[in-house]
Amino acid sequence: MATVYELTDALGIDREAINVELTKEDPGSWGKGDGGMMKREVIAITLPLTQPLDAWLPTLKQGLEALLAPRAD
């Protein structure tokens, strides 16, 4: 979990805006979701079940960067 927070901290994402699922699921995922009771948008992260976290972190980083990139409308 600490390595996920190190990555999101480096990207400037507030820890309060992150929801890391307790269960793992392949292939791992990330996306924007509702904050439930927090009533604000959060980034939901599901860690992969079978892939080592260190090997998956570059994929997560690329995905989060794309998710946070401003959209050209």
Image (tube, helix red, strand yellow):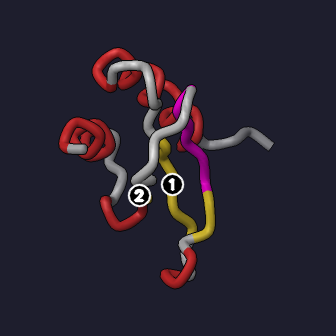
Say which label, 1 or 2, has the lower sequence index.
2
What residue would you read off at disc 2? 18
Image quadrant in which you'd find residue 29: top right
- Front in this rendered view, residue 40 or 19: 19
Q: Dot 1 lies on which element?
A: strand
Where, quadrant-wise, is the N terminus in this rendering?
Answer: top left
User: Could you tell me residue 6's position as x and y percent?
Assistant: 21, 40
Instruction: Name the residue type under label 2.
Output: Ile
User: Could you tell me residue 38's position as x and y percent?
Assistant: 49, 81
Quick check: 61 left or right of 27?
left
Residue 43 shows which numbered tag?
Answer: 1
- In three-dimensional space, the C-alpha distance between marks 1 and 2, rounded to whole angstroms, equals 5 Å
Where, quadrant-wise, is the C terminus in this rendering?
Answer: top right
- Front in this rendered view, residue 65 or 26: 26
User: Mark 1, residues whose alpha carbon is within 10 Å: few (<14), some, or many (≥20)?
Assistant: many
Q: Which residue lies at the image location 32% right of the left edge and 43% below the top edge?
A: 8
Residue furthest to the right: 73
User: Could you tell me residue 58's position as x and y percent?
Assistant: 39, 20
Residue furthest to the top: 55
Residue 13 shows which numbered tag?
Answer: none
User: Could you tell me residue 31's position as x and y percent?
Assistant: 60, 47
Instruction: Name the residue type under label 1.
Output: Ile
- Front in this rendered view, residue 47 or 66: 47
Q: Which residue lies at the image location 46% right of the left edge and 40% below the top edge?
A: 24
Asked if residue 52 lies in the magenta stretch, the reply is no
Question: Do the residues bearing badges 1 and 2 touch, measured as CB atoms within 8 Å?
Answer: yes
Q: Dot 2 lies on which element?
A: strand
User: Mark 2, residues whose alpha carbon is within 10 Å: few (<14), some, or many (≥20)?
Assistant: some
Image quadrant in which you'd find residue 50: top left
- What range is drawn magenta here? 27-32
Q: Which residue lies at the image location 40% right of the left edge and 21% below the top edge?
A: 56
Q: Which residue lies at the image location 40% right of the left edge and 53% below the top edge?
A: 22
